[in-house]
Image (cartoon, grey):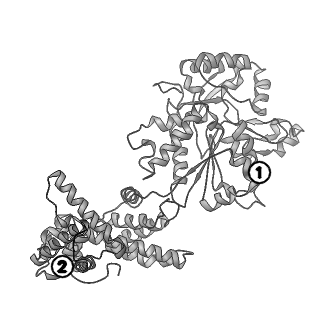
């Protein structure tokens, strides 16, 4: 793999055409022109750079899944680019809806379109070849081996029947005269990038993948084995040298999966009345968990399964990453913590393994509607209430899932209230009696830890006030003692208000005694809330109204 800066002939606006001899000289000067599809994609991904988190190629479009992306680059594309057996594997992404699988593939496609327009990603092909094949395939075996040793490259595959006929008929077999052109991948122009999406198996034909007989050509040339009577325009044909996407691959009828057996393992596939046709392409497919489990449990799929590199593509569990995603998908003006609250709800719905949770598109849809119908910055309370209204409308949602989502929404609302209390806490006065109660509580906790005489009833009474669940009280006490020990070690002041549950309690008690809302209102404005939002939020803090409406 070569990454040096180069200056190669041919641009989108100034096409280049030369002889094979001229192209061969270019390859000797710039050996990366001989790269196969996996090498090309790997160079594209690494050319954008990397930091401590991962590869910058994905940075602005996929959020919170750096570990997955690092794995696919380092465990699949890198070994494949170096010629290991991974290049003979189909890359299968398995994950829930909207986890980023399709976005990942789209990034590869759009990236290849841009990359092949650069000198570092330049691709040259035999002029007139329907599969834009590598001109080096013109070389006979002995010359291939010599060039491979000379340049440290790999030349794999054979000319397709039409291109072989073209070389013989147009150039008399003189490969030195064969014309070579620079090509630029384009999904729209069906060059270097293919896409297959399953539909009704009764009407969908295998020709969509491998091409079809040209009946006009058949009438003209009289034989099905004449390559001029065949259309090499299937998705596997046009994706040669680039990338092939299989959307929802495991929904495909079996007949569409058979060509992948030889394509993945041997780099060729069968079509028409011809020998196996060589193809050099990265094959990326995606599916959901349920379809994948059914596929795995069917013993008939063992051969294809062994030719797959399966990568789990789960939802992430990072609120910060979800905020970045929402900012990218629904740009606009937001009051402080509005997007954090929506992101907290989304993440709270997700399972530990990230394979289940609410569809992020649902949250994006709700947020988009709120943003478009809000004259000023969007508030967290407006998002929470909109989500509460819309959750029961999710198609096919059952009672258990709805209860789970409502629980996540309540936790997001609680987290929001805790953030707001933290903001306004400094502007509130804590009663001396409450401080004394908490100091006494901490003394009793220490005696409890020392297994000395302590007032268990008093401890439970305070923990009831702090809304500490019964099954979490020992852990709560241990956490306070641990914070106290760390404060001693660091020679810093230990403050009980540093615990969210205690701060929330003190905040609520102080708000009940407040004479004027002005200090709270001013504190909220000082932290970036608009005057109108601060006024509404102050009113909600001073009243027992349910934030979910």
Mark 2–mark 1 Cα distance, whole angstroms, equals: 71 Å
Which quadrant of the structure image shows residue 539? bottom left
Task: Tell me the residue at 47%/61% (across/down).
Answer: 352
Task: Tell me the residue at 28%/64% (across/down).
Answer: 478
Which quadrant of the structure image shows residue 142? top right
Q: Position of residue 170 (x, y in %)?
A: 76, 25
Q: Classify 448 as above or below 491.
A: below
Q: Secondary structure at mark 1?
A: loop
Q: Earlier in the sequence, mark 2 or mark 1?
A: 1
Residue that protrudes farthest toward the right in the picture: 222
Seen from the viewer's position, the closer of residues 363 and 350 is: 350
Q: Residues within 10 Å of mark 2 (few under 14, many from 20)?
A: some
Quadrant containing the C terminus is bottom left
Seen from the viewer's position, the closer of residues 164 and 430 is: 430
Q: Which mark is residue 206?
A: 1
Residue that protrudes farthest toward the front in the picture: 452
Q: Classify 58 as above or below 349.
A: above
Q: For residue 140, say whether it is visible.
A: no
Nearer to us: label 2 or label 1: 2
387 displayed left or right of 544: right
Q: Position of residue 472 (x, y in %)?
A: 34, 71
Q: Which residue is mark 2?
A: 509
Q: Position of residue 348 (x, y in %)?
A: 42, 66
Q: For residue 441, say whether it is visible.
A: yes
């Amino acid at each position: 793999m070569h990454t040096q800066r180069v200056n190669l002939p041919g641009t989108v606006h100034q096409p280049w055409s030369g002889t094979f001899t001229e192209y061969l000289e270019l390859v000797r000067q710039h050996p990366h022109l001989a790269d196969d599809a996996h090498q090309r994609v790997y160079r594209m991904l690494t050319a954008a750079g990397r930091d401590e988190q991962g590869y910058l190629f994905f940075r602005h479009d996929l959020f919170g899944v750096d570990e997955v992306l690092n794995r696919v680059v380092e465990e699949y594309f890198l070994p494949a680019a170096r010629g290991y057996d991974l290049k003979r594997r189909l890359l299968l992404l398995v994950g829930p809806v909207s986890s980023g699988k399709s976005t990942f593939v789209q990034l590869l496609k759009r990236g290849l379109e841009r990359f092949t327009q650069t000198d570092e990603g330049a691709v040259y092909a035999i002029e007139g070849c329907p599969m834009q094949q590598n001109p080096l395939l013109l070389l006979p075996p002995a010359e291939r081996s010599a060039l491979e040793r000379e340049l440290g490259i790999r030349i794999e595959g054979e000319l397709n029947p039409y291109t072989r006929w073209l070389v013989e008929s147009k150039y008399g077999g003189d490969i030195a005269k064969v014309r070579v052109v620079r090509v630029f991948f384009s999904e729209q122009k069906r060059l270097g990038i293919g896409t297959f999406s399953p539909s009704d198996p009764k009407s969908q034909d295998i020709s969509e993948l491998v091409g079809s007989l040209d009946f006009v050509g058949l009438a003209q040339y009289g034989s099905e084995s004449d390559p001029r009577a065949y259309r090499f325009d299937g998705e596997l044909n046009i994706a040669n040298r680039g990338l092939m996407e299989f959307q929802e691959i495991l929904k495909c009828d079996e007949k569409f999966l058979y060509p992948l057996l030889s394509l993945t393992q041997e780099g060729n596939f069968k079509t028409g009345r011809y020998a196996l046709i060589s193809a050099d392409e990265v094959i990326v497919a995606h599916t959901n968990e349920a379809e994948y489990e059914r596929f795995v449990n069917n013993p008939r799929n063992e051969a294809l399964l062994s030719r797959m590199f399966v990568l789990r593509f789960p939802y992430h569990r990072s609120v910060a990453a979800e905020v970045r995603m929402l900012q990218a998908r629904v740009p606009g003006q937001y009051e402080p913590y509005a997007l954090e609250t929506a992101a907290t709800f989304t993440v709270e719905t997700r399972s530990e393994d990230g394979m289940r949770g609410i569809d992020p598109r649902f949250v994006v849809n709700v947020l988009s509607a709120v943003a478009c119908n809000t004259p000023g910055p969007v508030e967290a309370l407006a998002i929470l209430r909109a989500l509460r209204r819309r959750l029961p409308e999710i198609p096919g949602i059952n009672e258990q899932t709805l209860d789970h989502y409502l629980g996540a929404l309540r936790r997001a609302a609680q987290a929001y209230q805790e953030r707001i209390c933290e903001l306004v806490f400094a502007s509130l006065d804590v009663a001396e009696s409450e401080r004394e109660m908490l100091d006494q509580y901490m003394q009793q906790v220490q005696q409890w830890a020392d297994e000395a005489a302590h007032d268990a009833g008093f401890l439970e009474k305070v923990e009831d006030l702090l809304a500490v669940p019964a099954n979490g009280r020992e852990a709560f006490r241990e956490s306070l003692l641990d914070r106290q020990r760390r404060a001693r070690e660091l020679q810093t002041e230990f403050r009980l208000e540093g615990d969210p549950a205690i701060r929330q309690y003190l905040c609520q008690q102080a708000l009940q005694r407040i004479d004027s809302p002005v200090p709270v209102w001013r504190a909220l404005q000082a932290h970036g809330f608009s005057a109108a939002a601060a006024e509404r939020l102050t009113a909600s803090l001073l009243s027992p109204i349910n934030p979910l409406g």
